[in-house]
Image (spheres, helix red, strand yellow):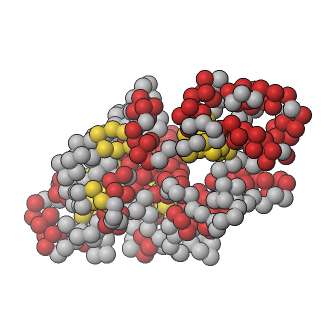
């Protein structure tokens, strides 16, 4: 996929996870991404330690490959002038600054498109670009709480829990990426840029689509169901001798296969379990009957029997087990990427391929300000001008 977005230049004014994930995706598809960071400190995620790898926060390393880092202090007028100059030469600008902040600095969409009408300007915020909370800060777990995701996560007899992965941040990064691509596609015909906006809150509400649909269509307020899916059965975890396996039988044929694999073929004909509705209604009885068999087996043995008959199932893997998994390896999801400052650096590849090709892994996550001079020269600054900007600490 090296050449799909080759020739496009992206100005990245994001930090933390959501925005950097969006711009990493653009870089993975071939765009040249120029990451603007505060001199001296950089992206906050650089300091999110522990955990760290060679002194750099692993969160930063996870979402900042395929970028060049430039140190610019946008709090200074000279630094803002540099950003304006760069924005006049790029195709895309992505930022994750609170609504109104860049506009107050003369770096809003309307300010920049006057000099670059082809600019696709993507703004990522916490709660959106309008409304009573538009200027509030927000992070992934906070938005999980706000949008109801935590109310539906965890077990009913325990407090609400956050989803353990950054679904809000990375989901928002995906929507920013999708919106940017759509605007670039439109630009091919119109010749004009666009103002793309998305937010963590909108992503969280969108993730709640099925549960909001239950409420709007049937008046059902979803609760915490732990590992089971309330609309299908068996669709949950079952204890084994050494842990647990998750079984997902989404139709009658798969349910019959589960019963055969566990040596309970007659269950498929039991009137209590004849179809999904009745299996859901009688879930406790069905769970007890199936778990009586799984609990006598090791997890590996149980999964082997189920997979032999085509019944969807999995051991509940830990992070280290996923890293070592042969299917993950077969799909090339974990890849090394040369990085002198992180000698053993490995990265997680994109979950999509085009004509057999996956991400274009060209550059490891950069050191802070590693490309400042290079990018400023590209923007037309002379050596003397760059020295002057360094002297007044506008760049670093």
Q: Which of the image's four quarters has the N terminus?
A: top left
Residue 51, image quadrant: bottom left
Residue drawn where x is 13% and y is 73% of the image: 391
Q: Nearer the viewer, residue 227 or 204?
A: 227
- Measured as percent of width and height from the top left, residue 211 is found at 73, 54
Q: Is residue 129 left or right of residue 364?
A: right
Please tell me which residue is depicted at 40% across the width and 33% down the height of the picture. Answer: 329
| Residue lying furthest right | 271
Give the residue at x 63% y 53%: 207
Viewer-proximal residue among 55 and 71: 55
Q: Which residue sits at x=78%, y=53%? A: 214
Q: Position of residue 335 (x, y in %)?
A: 33, 38
Q: How many marks?
A: 0
Residues 33 and 120: in front is 33
Q: Is residue 284 left or right of residue 186?
A: right
Residue 225, how many percent across, how many down?
70, 55
């Amino acid at each position: 996929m090296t050449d799909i977005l080759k020739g496009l230049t992206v100005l990245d004014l994001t930090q933390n996870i959501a925005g950097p994930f969006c711009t990493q995706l653009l870089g993975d598809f071939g765009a040249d991404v120029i990451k603007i960071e505060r001199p001296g400190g950089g992206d906050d995620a650089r300091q999110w330690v522990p955990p760290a790898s060679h002194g750099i926060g692993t969160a930063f390393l996870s979402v900042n490959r395929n970028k060049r880092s430039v140190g610019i202090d946008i709090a200074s007028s000279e630094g803002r002038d540099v950003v304006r100059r760069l924005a006049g030469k790029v195709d895309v600008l992505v930022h994750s600054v609170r609504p109104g902040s860049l506009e107050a600095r003369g770096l809003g969409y309307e300010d920049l498109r006057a000099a670059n009408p082809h600019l696709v300007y993507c703004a990522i915020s916490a709660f959106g670009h309008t409304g009573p909370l538009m200027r509030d800060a927000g992070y992934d777990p906070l938005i999980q709480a706000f949008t109801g995701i935590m109310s539906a996560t965890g077990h009913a007899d325990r407090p609400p829990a956050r989803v353990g992965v950054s679904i809000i941040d990375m989901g928002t990064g995906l929507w920013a990426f999708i919106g940017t691509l759509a605007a670039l596609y439109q630009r091919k015909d119109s010749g004009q840029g666009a103002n793309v906006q998305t937010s963590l809150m909108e992503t969280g509400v969108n993730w709640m689509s099925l549960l909001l649909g239950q409420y709007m269509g049937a008046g059902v307020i979803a609760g915490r169901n732990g590992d089971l899916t309330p609309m299908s059965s068996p669709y949950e975890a079952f204890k084994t001798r050494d842990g647990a396996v998750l079984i997902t039988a989404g139709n009658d044929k798969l349910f019959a296969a589960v019963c055969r694999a566990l040596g309970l073929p007659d269950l498929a004909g039991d009137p209590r379990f004849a179809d999904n509705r009745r299996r859901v209604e009688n879930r406790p009885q069905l769970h007890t009957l199936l778990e009586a068999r799984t609990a006598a087996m090791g997890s590996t043995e149980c999964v082997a029997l189920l997979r032999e008959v085509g019944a969807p199932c999995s051991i509940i893997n830990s992070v280290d087990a996923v890293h070592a998994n042969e299917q993950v390896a077969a799909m090339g999801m974990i890849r090394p990427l040369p990085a002198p400052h992180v000698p053993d650096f490995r990265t997680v590849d994109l979950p999509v391929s085009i004509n057999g090709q996956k991400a274009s892994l060209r550059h490891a996550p950069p050191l802070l300000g590693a490309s400042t001079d290079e990018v400023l020269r590209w923007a037309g600054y002379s050596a003397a001008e760059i020295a002057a900007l360094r002297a007044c600490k506008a760049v670093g």
